[in-house]
Image: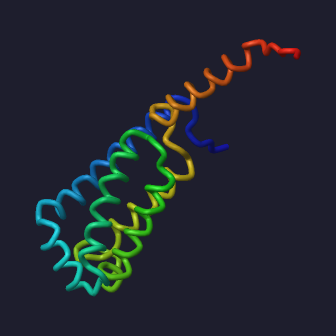
């Protein structure tokens, strides 16, 4: 019977996947930053993306916030949903008409980014993440609060 990874191997794989995806997305956004916002907006406009300056700004911010969120393993669901939205827009406006393959500027990379994002959103960041650290701290505080006996004051 086949089983998924569990325990430490699962958490190591999730960490590596998060770091690779974060690197890819940082480089994706850096390309836009390096070109400059207005040049990026011009390219967006040529692809027929509405409100190109706003879309370019939104895309750069989402890609950077998502990269940081994924690298740290911190609250990935909202940034992941926004990244999925951005990548769906990339397929709709830019890559979808070119087919699947990257040699033709197709949507393979964008589709893979969407899949990786959705998987991380559904599995969580794993044990080696800030979400885990914050969760453990919260659990400790809750235990400490419950361990303190409550005193009632009679009037």
Residue 56 on image: x %, y %: 26, 71
117 relative to 29 in the view: left or right: right
Of residues 89 and 11, which is closer to you in this image?
89
Position of residue 53 measured from the top left corner of the image (x, y, whole percent): 24, 75
Give the colouring mode of the picture: rainbow
Image position of 124 (left or right of 18): right
What residue do we see at 73% from left, 13% from top?
Answer: 148
**100 up-or-down from 152: above or below:** below
73 w.r.t. 28: above or below: above
Q: In the rendering, at what x and y percent does residue 72 appear?
A: 39, 39
Up-down relation of residue 139 to residue 21 (above or below): above
Q: Indicate left or right for 1 with 22 as reference.
A: right
* Side of 42 relative to 25 (left or right): left
Residue that sits furthest to the front in the current view: 155
For the point 49% across and 41% down, the residue is 125
Residue drawn at x 43%, y 63% is: 82
Position of 142 relative to 22 (above/below): above
Along the line of sight, which residue is nearer the eye, 72 or 17? 72
Q: Quadrant of the C terminus?
A: top right
């Amino acid at each position: 019977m086949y089983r998924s990874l569990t325990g430490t191997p699962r958490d190591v794989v999730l960490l590596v996947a998060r770091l690779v995806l974060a690197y890819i997305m940082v480089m994706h956004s850096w390309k836009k930053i390096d070109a400059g916002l207005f040049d990026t907006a011009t390219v967006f406009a040529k692809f027929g993306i509405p409100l190109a300056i706003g879309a370019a700004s939104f895309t750069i911010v989402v890609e950077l916030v998502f990269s940081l969120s994924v690298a740290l393993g911190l609250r990935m669901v909202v940034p992941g949903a926004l990244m999925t939205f951005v990548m769906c827009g990339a397929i709709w406006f830019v890559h979808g008409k070119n087919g699947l393959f990257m040699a033709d500027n197709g949507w393979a990379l964008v589709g893979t980014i969407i899949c990786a994002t959705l998987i991380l959103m559904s599995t969580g960041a794993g044990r080696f993440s800030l979400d885990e650290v914050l969760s453990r701290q919260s659990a400790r505080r809750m235990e400490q609060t419950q361990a303190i006996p409550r005193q009632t004051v009679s009037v």
